[in-house]
Structure formats: C-alpha cells, structure tokens
C-alpha cells in the first residue's frame, strides 16, 4: 500500500444519497465522489439502503487499485426501522434478555439496509441530569451499566459477524464523557483515580470482555488531556492492560477540536497526536 492508500483507509466520510447519483453538481461533491471510488476512504457514515450501499461498494471495487471494500456505518441507538424505548428507559427494566433482543432486532434491520457497523452502545456512566445525553446510556450505576453494555454488544454482534443479521458494535465514549462539568456537552471532566477505575471504566472493560470490535473516544477533556489524544486511555489501558484487539474511531470532530482545547497546534498536529495516542480511524474532519 502507498502512504496515501494507508491514510485513506483511516478516513471516514459522512455522505448522503447524493453520492449514489450519476452526476455530482459541484466541484466539492465531485472530489468527494472520486475519493470514495478510488480507495481514499475506508468507511462511510449515513449512507442508507441496500441499493445505495451496494452501488457505491460496486463502484469502489471496480475503480480502486486495491479493491478494499468500504465499511458502512450508522448511529443505530434504539432501533433502526422499529423504534424501541430509549436506552435509559430500557435500563430501568433490568431485563437484560430484553435489551439483548432489541439490539439484535436493530442489528437485523440495519444489516438488511446495508449497514455493517453501528456507533452504539453508549455506556457512559453519568450522574448529572443536566447532561442531555443521559438518554443514550444506562444510568448512574457501573454494575448495571456493565451488564447492559455487554448484552447490547452481544445483541448487535451475535455469535458470528459474518452472519447477515449482525453488525459490529462500538463502545462509546472512551472515557468520562458523562462526567462533563455542569452537564455541558464537550466540556472537561476532572475525576479522581477511584472514580475513574471504579465508576467510569467498568462498563468499557465489560464490552472488551464481550468481544466488541470498536471503541469511540469522546469530545471531552479528562484531567487536562483531550481523550482523543490520550495515550493513557487508548494505549496504556485499552490496548495494553485490557488487550483490546479492535480499532478506535474518533467522535466526529473530536480530533480537530483538540486545537480548541489548546492541545494541538493545527490540523496536522491534531492528526499526529490522535494517531500516536492510539486512534485508528478518524472522521472526515481529520481527513488529509
């Protein structure tokens, strides 16, 4: 592989149905389309429908040098076509078998639509009701959160990811996103060692033990370091201590936002810091 091809495989684009049309109506769309079909993109977010995903996949295989298939991803949070109660509401039931079934049903519907990868489950423990994303998680208890995290991964991935009714799961957001100060999204989190290891990390570790295929880091700063650039979290804990064998994807613009946090000087620096910390795939905002 050339260096450009290697970088391309780490690049994810968010595209819509315009990418499946025969004509691109502006230079930007044409450039993105050409990058898609020549192998400069590794995965695609938000392209839905078996017909659309098959068409783009066929164009990639026919036009790229290495013919590496795209991965199609989507946020399947509490259902795809069939909508289930939000994760927080489901967690109140303590019915682990039910939560596995809803994740399994969601995976089957998403897979039938051409989706192979979901950015769920969100397993952030949070104890501040002002943080709006509490609805995506399992509440404030790490024991219950760990049990739910594992069954949701099992529901999405099943026993065999080659089966046509399963999709790869993503554990998010690594880590401490739910402890953002004042409940403000993207804000900093300042926690002690006991809280980190006894409250925040257990659900994440449970998904590693369940065999989750990917992790997503967060937007937040943890104890002074943006988690996207934290080698402590991604290399020391996740990959070395826990032996995680999957890959880590950045959360939307969390790479470039390290500039706003004063951690990275510019986009190039942010990309280097993200990669050195252990992030394996970056969203479009980090594209070369």
Image (cartoon, rainbow, N blue to C red):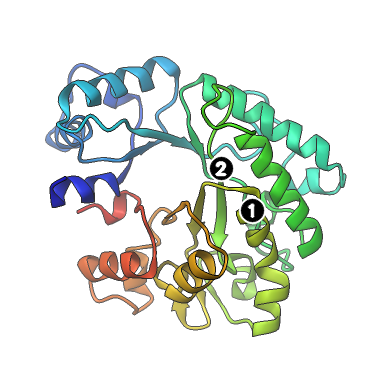
Answer left or right for 160 relative to 60: right
Answer left or right for 2 relative to 36: left
Instruction: Say which residue appears at 68% left-offset and 35% top-offset.
Output: 103
Q: CA distance from mark 1 to mark 2?
A: 10 Å
Q: Quadrant of the N terminus?
A: top left
Instruction: Say which residue appears at 33% left-offset and 34% top-offset.
Output: 15
Within-10-Å neighbours for mark 2: few <14, some 14–19, many 20+: many
Pointer 2 residue: 169
Q: Position of residue 18 (x, y in %)?
A: 29, 25
Instruction: Say which residue appears at 41% left-offset and 53% top-offset.
Output: 252
Q: Is residue 46 visible?
A: yes
Image height of 178 relative to 77, above or below: below
Q: Position of residue 261 (x, y in %)?
A: 38, 76
Secondary structure of the residue carrying numbered label 2: loop
Q: Nearer the viewer, residue 6 or 43?
A: 6
Instruction: Say which residue appears at 87% left-offset and 44% top-offset.
Output: 93
Answer left or right for 115 relative to 59: right
To which quarter of the image does residue 163 belong?
top right
Q: How many marks?
A: 2
Q: Position of residue 64 (x, y in %)?
A: 17, 30
Q: Is residue 141 visible?
A: no
Please report contact status of discs 1 and 2: CB closer than 8 Å, yes or no.
yes
Q: Quadrant of the C terminus?
A: bottom left
Image height of 19 relative to 181, above or below: above
Pointer 1 residue: 207
Q: Position of residue 205 (x, y in %)?
A: 64, 61
Where residue 122 is drawn, which disc sits there?
none
Image height of 135 relative to 44, above or below: below
To which quarter of the image does residue 197 belong?
bottom right
The tag earlier along the polypeptide, 1 or 2, is: 2
Secondary structure of the residue carrying numbered label 1: helix
């Amino acid at each position: 592989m050339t260096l450009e091809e290697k970088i391309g495989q780490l690049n994810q684009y968010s595209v819509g149905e315009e990418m499946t049309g025969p004509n691109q109506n502006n230079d930007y769309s044409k450039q993105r389309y050409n990058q898609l079909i020549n192998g400069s993109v590794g995965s695609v977010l938000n392209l839905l429908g078996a017909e659309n995903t098959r068409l783009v996949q066929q164009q990639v295989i026919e036009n790229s040098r290495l013919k590496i298939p795209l991965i199609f991803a989507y946020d399947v949070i509490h259902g795809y076509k069939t909508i289930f109660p939000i994760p927080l509401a489901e967690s109140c039931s303590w019915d682990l078998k039910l939560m596995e079934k809803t994740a399994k049903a969601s995976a089957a519907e998403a897979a039938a639509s051409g989706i192979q990868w979901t950015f769920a489950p969100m397993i952030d423990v949070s104890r501040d009701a002002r943080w709006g994303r509490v609805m995506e998680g399992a509440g404030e208890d790490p024991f219950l959160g760990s049990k739910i995290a594992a069954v949701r991964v099992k529901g999405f991935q099943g026993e065999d990811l080659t089966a046509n009714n399963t999709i790869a799961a993503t554990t998010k957001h690594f880590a401490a996103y739910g402890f953002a100060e004042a409940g403000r999204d993207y804000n900093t989190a300042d926690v002690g060692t006991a809280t980190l290891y006894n409250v925040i990390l257990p659900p994440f570790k449970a998904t590693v033990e369940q065999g989750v295929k990917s992790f997503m880091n967060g937007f937040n700063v943890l104890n002074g370091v943006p988690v996207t650039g934290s080698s402590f979290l991604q290399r020391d804990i996740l990959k070395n201590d826990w032996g995680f064998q999957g890959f880590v994807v950045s959360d939307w613009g969390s790479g470039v936002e390290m500039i706003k946090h004063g951690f990275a000087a510019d986009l190039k620096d942010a990309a280097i810091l993200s990669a050195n910390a252990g992030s394996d795939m970056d969203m479009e905002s980090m594209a070369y």
